[in-house]
Amino acid sequence: MVDHAKLLIREQRYAEANFLLEALPESERRLPELICLSGFIKFNQIAQNAPDAESLAAELATRADNNLARYQLSALKLLAGETEEALEYLLEIVRREPGFDNDAARQSMLTIFQTLGPDDDLVKRYRSLLSGVLNAVH
């Protein structure tokens, strides 16, 4: 089933791939590979429904409180391989509105951390930054 989901992802059939992954038992969905796949699907769905990066950046320049634009921009940046920029946008959402979209920014950061692995320098740095922000919020 996981291989079928990967094939659907390659074909950009994200909703179908997500449906297959969601049908798996909870214990399997918690496996690192499946967490990464689910995160990739979500980022792609967000990016597909987003305006272009330039429009989102212009929106943030005029409305700094627009966390939806920030979240969409993080997805576009991540898919463009600009992981640090994506993490920075997500961290800013956690700073400004920790509960944004049912904790989507923090959860997205955790998915990126899982994908990159615990020894990655970005993970080490942003995990510490996230912890600091969360401690300041609570």
Image: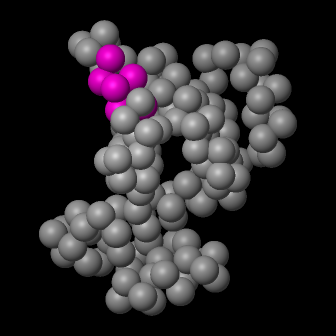
Relative to 9, say whether 110 is above or below. Answer: above
Q: Is residue 86 magenta?
A: no
Residue drawn at (45%, 89%) of the image: 4
Image position of 24 (left or right of 88): left
Instruction: Name the residue at 37% across, 35% down.
Output: 124
**Residue shown at 26% from the left, 78% from the top:** 24
Occupied quadrant, residue 100? top left
The one nearer the camera, 134 or 14, is 134
- Magenta includes 129? yes
Whether 4 is drawn above or below 111: the answer is: below
Q: Which region of the structure is painted magenta? A: 126-132
Position of residue 59 in the picture relative to residue 129 (left or right): right
- Can residue 50 be seen at all in this image of the molecule? yes
Relative image position of residue 135 (x, y in whole percent)? 26, 15
Residue 71 seen in the current view:
no
Query: Which residue is farthest left?
Result: 27
Q: Is residue 135 above or below residue 70?
A: above
Q: Can you say which quadrant of the picture contains the N terminus?
A: bottom left
> Measured from the top left, where is residue 92 in percent x and y?
52, 23
> Which residue does the image show at 32% across and 17% down from the upper left?
132
